[in-house]
Amino acid sequence: MRTKENGIDAVLVSTPDHVHAVACMAAVKKGKHVYCEKPLTHSIYETRRVTEAARKAGVATQMGNLGHSGEGIRLAVEWIRDGAIGPVREVHGWTSVGRPDR
């Protein structure tokens, strides 16, 4: 019996954070590869359970931030690796996390 689910190879999880581990686990148990927005889980226990289930199911999982999956980031990485912008000696990073106005 063929279902719509059979045509799905992978799942992207971008639900509210508290649902990530549950949604990932449901997909992994059905044999689906998973890309999950951060955070993947809220505890080491949840992380170990998802990891064990993924190994057992033989699927790939990845946690990330879609903001770092765009063409601009890939292009910058390519320039750095190819030496197009010269040697990188220093990198500055910033975030709005923790700012009282955000």
Image (cartoon, helix red, strand yellow):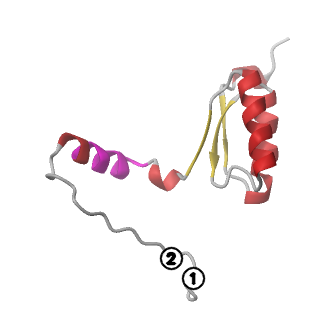
Q: Is residue 95 left or right of residue 22?
A: left
Q: Is residue 24 magenta?
A: no
Pointer 2 with pointer 1, Cβ within 8 A: yes
Query: x and y percent of residue 28 in the render?
Result: 76, 31
Q: Which residue is mark 1?
A: 102
**Can residue 66 be seen at all in this image of the molecule?**
yes
For label 1, the crowd category at 10 Å Cα-Cα, with few meaning under 14, some 14 to 19 and many 20 or more, is few
**Can residue 16 be seen at all in this image of the molecule?**
no
Q: Is residue 51 left or right of residue 45?
A: left
Amino acid at the residue labelled 1: Arg
The numbered disc on residue 96 is 2
Residue at x 77% of width, y 54% of height: 43
Could you say whether the residue bearing mark 1 is in a helix, strand or loop? loop
Nearer the observer, 67 or 98: 98
- Magenta stretch in the rendered image: 70-79
Amino acid at the residue labelled 2: Ser
Residue at x 56% of width, y 88% of height: 101
